[in-house]
Amino acid sequence: MNETGNVLIKTSQDPSRHLPDHLSKFFSEAVASLCMITRAISTATNPDTGRSFSIYDHSALEQMLTKHPQFLWLTQEVTEFEVKHDEDFIRKSGSVLLGGEHNAGIHHKMNAIYASMHATACLARKRGSVNAECERLGHLTLCCENLVGVPFITMILTHISHEHCISIPQKRQKKWWDLTRKTIEYKKDTYLFNSEYRGAE
């Protein structure tokens, strides 16, 4: 994954070798689309609030992907986690998204992602614009796969409620003997990316 946790590349090829040119073009086009989406959202004004959209605004992200000509919605998965500590949610959601429940690097990036979403949720609450601005908060992950020479790219939009974005870090302050649990609904929408480079020589 890259430093922001937005791009994930999976390959069955020897990692010391460069990807073939047509795969590099395919992946680069998808990364450029991701950059354009986040830039368009961050520089647009939310008509309901008069302020710039947050790049974690689920509604804006969903609308952008739905109307993008290169993304086709495939599935939505809904998972409910029972957690008693913030680390439980970070570890379990990282496993659902990336298949790396016990990977320290993934855990570190997921922790940073939720910290940013928490800050966004707190700002919206402070402004008093929770319902209009970010009822749900989301994060985009571009998954570029090269398995046995076959390229496959999906954009994954994961999202949770504003309430849960606020409450997750609060569990960090819990005493070890506090066994209370909270159910957090976690949604993952997957979109297929189509490219002019697919199948190119």
Image (spheres, rainbow, N blue to C red):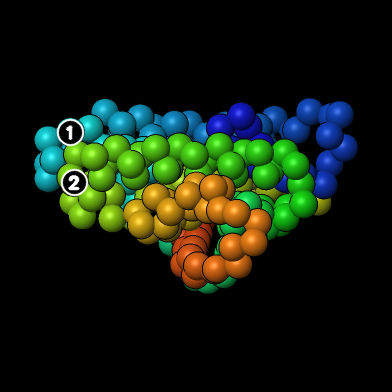
Which x, y percent locates residue 166? 39, 50
Q: Which of 126 and 114 is in front in this view?
A: 126
Which residue does the image show at 53% across and 34% down from the upper left?
A: 31
Q: Quadrant of the N terminus?
A: top right
- The tag on residue 42 is none
- The tag on residue 51 is 1
Residue 4 drawn above or below residue 141: above
Tell which tag, 2 or 1, sits nearer the viewer.
Answer: 2
Which residue does the image show at 75% across and 42% down from the upper left?
A: 104
Examine the rendering and report whether any part of residue 198 can be seen.
no
Which residue is tagged 2? 129
Say whether marks 2 and 1 touch (CB < 8 Å). yes
Q: Give left or right: position of 123 versus 166.
A: left
User: For the residue marked with disc 2, what is the amino acid?
Assistant: Ser
Measure the C-alpha gap from mark 2 to mark 1. Answer: 11 Å
Residue 21 drawn above or below residue 13: above
User: For the residue marked with disc 1, what is the amino acid?
Assistant: Arg
Which residue does the image show at 56% across and 32% down from the upper left?
A: 4
Residue 15 drawn above or below residue 140: above
Which x, y percent locates residue 184? 48, 65
Which x, y percent locates residue 188? 50, 61
Q: Which type of secondary structure does the marked residue at label 1 adopt? A: loop
